[in-house]
Image (cartoon, coloured by chain):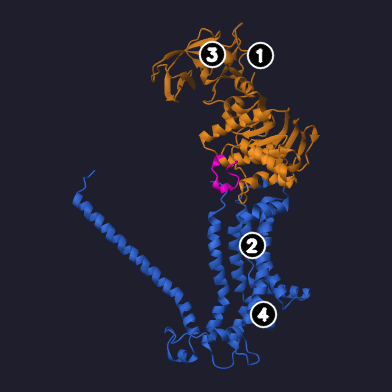
Chain colours: A blue, B orange
């Protein structure tokens, strides 16, 4: 082996340190650029929604508003209050809430129950059944529009919130079942055996033993379902119109059907309002998600 | 009173038969260890006794009643699992009393049992903790507590010590032993660890490929294994097995190792055959490593041998030495003060009173 010259080593060390600093800064630069790229539309939305129409016409997209006014937000939320046929978001926002809360709750609950039965109470053909559930995940929205419309018609719940809840629950069940099945398969069967010997039955084991340790996957499922259902436009516009429409449909109507001048500030505010609940769910549930992941591990 | 009887029990998973007509009779207060390699069906048998697996054929009787279709909770059993299977969302207290709550035991009774057994298992200071906050040994104790408070007629253990580190395993083994002594409850214990089996059991059932190969006291199993499988499975280092032929040799029956001339003969006159083999029958000659030893005048039947060490391993209080023995490698267990040197022959004795002879074809003891 060659004996290293100490001077050379010092030089090597120094150049390595320089290289590290350089790459670090390069990394931050690239990340920063991407950050700006992704955040720019959000910035434009917020800034525009706070300007008056006058300002929008005079300035460009990026300029900050002269003075902050929430008029556009107010208009988007509750309208101007005089024109008949004036579209504003408030009633449709509540429509969406009334649709998304039961749909998420029901599909998550039954997904959990399905996942539990499929993994812990094995029966003949359980794998085939799960395969069919998986298949359900790959069915595109468009494929079920017509049969669903027929079904809703026969059941007499077309153009209603209840109908939309049903559609989203049924469509989401494949996904929620898959999530819970994949989570429960990692929970040792011995825990269920122990509970059976202790005298707990099917539902008792589910509610007392499994559900309390399911928070990570519940959060994942809720985020997935909430985002999907809240942001859905296709089912909403296909199976509902007028007063029963969810917020995404109303937003579309508001932006596309205004008769007078395009009010960009109101449009931006409306789009933002329509996005707030999903943002909120991410911010609130994300915290529990991480907490759920770190706590409650079975083995040490 | 708690007896268990298993008769002609059969279990299939799909087309594979995992248990083949198992028969087992356990009397009150016994500690039975089901021992065998993984996949031999021992855990399946235990699960069936617990009622967690259905019975395909045969019967399981607890206290002389057929319980084939009785729910696990009504069988008067408790089970301790390898992964402890504690309920992660509940505190230690709730874990332990979960079973009692399910059977609607009165509050005072629950408190009393909890107090008694948590003290006995030294987990009384952990009652408010969650399982995630416990060490492996503590979890094991809680799992035992959960089984104990139910005061079952039969305890079932499914490899309860396999997840513990070596030191803790021995500690818990002692405690389970003491527990059995104290409670005198019937226990069925599944393990693949022969040391656990030897030290805990009143009787061991050695299982392989869905059948019980041999059942007997640890001493019987160790000294008189009834097949090559049992002989080889029990004991560490493993028993030495040498192929050869049986020769009547006039009045003195003897063993001739394979590929040896007639002048190498090991006398079998002191071995009591179950059934005398034919002249020239292919047999296997087995002896345990501790039966190669220094000459001992008190032994009446021994064979002096000159052996060359090929490998020497010190285990601490003794040496495991591998020798060349008529074309086979055999292991001997020698006291550590005996001087050994690689390649240098030493005079030793083979104790012929403790050997086992197997038929080569059936691999059964003869």
The residue shown at (78%, 38%) is B67
| Distance Cα–Cα, label 1 vs label 4 | 93 Å
| Distance Cα–Cα, label 3 vs label 1 | 21 Å
- Residue B71 occupies quadrant: top right
Comparing labels 2 and 1, the label whose residue is closer to the camera: 2
Magenta stretch, main secondary structure class: loop
| Distance Cα–Cα, label 2 vs label 4 | 25 Å
First of labels 3, 1 by sequence position: 1
Name the residue tied to disc 3: B351
Name the residue tied to disc 1: B276
Mark 3 vs 1: CB contact within 8 A? no
The residue shown at (74%, 35%) is B9
Q: Under tag 1, what secondary structure?
A: loop
List x then y, in percent, for residue B183: 68, 30
Comparing labels 1 and 4, the label whose residue is closer to the camera: 4
User: Would residue A84 be found to the left or right of residue B65 on screen?
Assistant: left
List x then y, in percent, for residue A290: 53, 59
Q: Is residue B336 magenta?
A: no
Name the residue tied to disc 2: A176
């Amino acid at each position: 082996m060659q004996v290293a010259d100490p001077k050379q080593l010092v030089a090597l060390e120094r150049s390595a340190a320089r290289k590290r600093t350089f790459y670090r800064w390069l990394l931050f630069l690239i990340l920063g650029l991407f950050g700006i790229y992704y955040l720019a539309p959000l910035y434009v939305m917020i800034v525009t929604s706070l300007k008056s129409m006058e300002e929008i016409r005079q300035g460009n997209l990026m300029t900050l508003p002269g003075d902050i006014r929430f008029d556009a937000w107010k208009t988007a939320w509750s309208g101007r209050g005089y024109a008949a046929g004036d579209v504003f978001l408030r009633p449709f926002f509540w429509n969406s809430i009334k649709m998304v809360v039961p749909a998420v709750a029901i599909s998550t609950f039954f997904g959990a129950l399905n996942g539990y039965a499929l993994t812990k109470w094995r029966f003949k053909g359980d794998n085939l059944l799960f395969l069919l559930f998986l298949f359900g995940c790959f069915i595109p929205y468009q494929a079920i529009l017509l049969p669903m419309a027929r079904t809703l018609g026969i059941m007499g719940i077309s153009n209603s919130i209840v109908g939309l809840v049903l559609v989203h629950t049924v469509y989401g069940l494949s996904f929620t079942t898959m999530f819970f099945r994949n989570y429960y398969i990692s929970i040792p069967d011995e825990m269920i055996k122990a509970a059976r010997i202790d005298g707990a039955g099917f539902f008792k084991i589910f509610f007392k033993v499994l559900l309390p340790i399911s928070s990570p996957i519940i959060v994942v499922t809720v985020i997935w379902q909430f985002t999907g259902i809240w942001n859905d436009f296709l089912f909403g516009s296909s199976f509902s119109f007028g007063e029963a429409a969810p917020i995404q449909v109303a937003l579309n109507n508001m932006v596309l059907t205004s008769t007078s001048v395009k009010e960009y500030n109101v449009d931006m505010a409306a789009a933002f309002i329509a996005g707030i609940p999903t943002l909120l769910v991410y911010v609130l549930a994300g915290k529990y998600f991480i907490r759920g992941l770190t706590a409650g591990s079975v083995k040490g | 009173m708690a007896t268990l009887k298993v008769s002609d029990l059969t279990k299939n998973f799909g087309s594979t038969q995992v248990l083949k007509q198992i028969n087992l009779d356990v009397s009150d207060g016994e500690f039975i260890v089901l021992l065998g390699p993984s996949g031999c069906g021992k855990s399946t048998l235990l699960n069936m006794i617990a009622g967690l697996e259905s019975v395909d054929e045969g019967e399981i009787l607890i206290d002389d009643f057929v319980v084939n279709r009785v729910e696990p909770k009504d069988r008067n059993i408790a089970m301790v699992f390898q992964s402890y299977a504690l309920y992660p969302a509940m505190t230690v207290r709730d874990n332990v009393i979960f079973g009692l709550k399910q059977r609607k035991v009165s509050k005072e009774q629950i408190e009393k049992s909890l107090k008694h057994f948590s003290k006995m298992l030294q987990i009384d200071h952990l009652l408010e903790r969650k399982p995630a906050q416990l060490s492996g040994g503590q979890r094991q104790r809680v799992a035992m507590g959960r089984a104990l408070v139910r005061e079952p007629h039969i305890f079932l253990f499914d490899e309860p010590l396999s997840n513990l580190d070596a030191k803790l395993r021995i500690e818990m083994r002692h405690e389970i032993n003491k527990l059995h002594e104290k409670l005198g409850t019937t226990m069925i214990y599944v393990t693949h660890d022969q040391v656990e089996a030897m030290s805990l059991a009143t009787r061991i059932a050695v299982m392989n490929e869905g059948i019980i190969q041999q059942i007997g006291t640890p001493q019987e199993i160790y000294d008189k294994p009834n097949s090559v499988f049992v002989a080889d499975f029990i004991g560490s280092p493993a028993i030495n097995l040498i192929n050869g032929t049986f020769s009547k040799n006039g009045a003195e029956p003897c063993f001739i190792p394979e590929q040896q001339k007639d002048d190498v003969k090991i006398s079998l006159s002191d071995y009591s055959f179950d059934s005398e083999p034919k002249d020239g029958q292919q047999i296997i000659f087995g002896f345990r490593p501790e039966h190669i030893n220094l000459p001992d005048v008190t032994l009446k039947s021994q064979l002096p041998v000159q052996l060359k060490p090929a490998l020497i391993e010190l285990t601490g209080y003794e040496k495991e030495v591998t020798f060349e023995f008529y074309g086979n490698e055999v292991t001997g267990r020698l006291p550590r003060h005996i001087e050994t040197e690689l390649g240098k022959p030493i005079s030793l004795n083979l104790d012929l009173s403790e050997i086992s002879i197997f038929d080569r074809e059936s691999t059964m003891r003869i």
